[in-house]
Image (cartoon, helix red, strand yellow):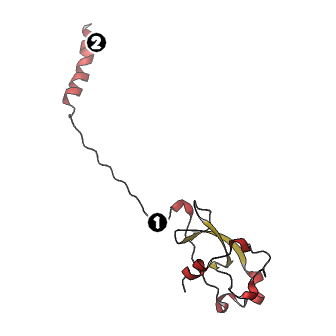
Amino acid sequence: MRLSILAALPLAAALALAPARSEAQVSATVHVGTPNRAWGREVVVRPYAQETYGDWHTSYRHWQPTTLYFRDGHYYPRKVPASRAVVVYRSHNSYFFPPRDEQWNNKDRRYNYRHRPTDDDYNRAPH
């Protein structure tokens, strides 16, 4: 019996010397209104410019139709929750909206016209 009392004495001493109150510091960072890193990098989509991308009558075959996903004023290469699909073109490392010429409609069979950019998309593009 004496042995168990002697073994309990260090435990009782440790509990008696422990502070009654301790402080903890917690920090958190919350990003409100900024893109989620898991969505990938943001893509800049420019308006079509004949000087940059060539005359669409002959150059469009070299362009790659690409689906981007629009959410909160940003375009992403991967699907993002609550986003809208927008089909644009890619040439080299540049993304751009298709031409707005009337003759352009239904010209490129590879292009998904159901997800063509809206007027808001064209107006949002940097000039």
The image shows residue 29 at horizontal and vertical percentages of 38, 57
Answer left or right for 88 relative to 35: right
| Image depth: mark 1 or mark 2 in front | 1
What residue is shown at x 45% (from left), y 65% (from top)? 33
Q: Is residue 112 above or below residue 101?
A: above
Answer left or right for 96 relative to 19: right
Q: Residues within 10 Å of mark 2 (few under 14, many from 20)?
A: few
Q: Is residue 107 above or below residue 4?
A: below
What residue is shown at x 56% (from left), y 64% (from top)? 40
Q: Quadrant of residue 23?
A: top left
Quadrant the C terminus occupies: bottom right
Q: Quadrant of residue 68?
A: bottom right
The residue pinned by badge 2 equals 4
The image shows residue 8 at horizontal and vertical percentages of 26, 17
What residue is shown at x 29% (from left), y 48% (from top)? 25
Return the mark for residue 34: 1
Disc 1/disc 2 C-alpha distance (Å)? 61 Å
Report the amino acid beneath label 2.
Ser
The first of marks 1 and 2 along the sequence is: 2
Answer left or right for 86 relative to 7: right
SS for tag 1?
loop
Q: Quadrant of residue 85?
A: bottom right
Q: Is residue 11 visible?
A: yes
SS for tag 2?
helix
The image shows residue 58 at horizontal and vertical percentages of 78, 89
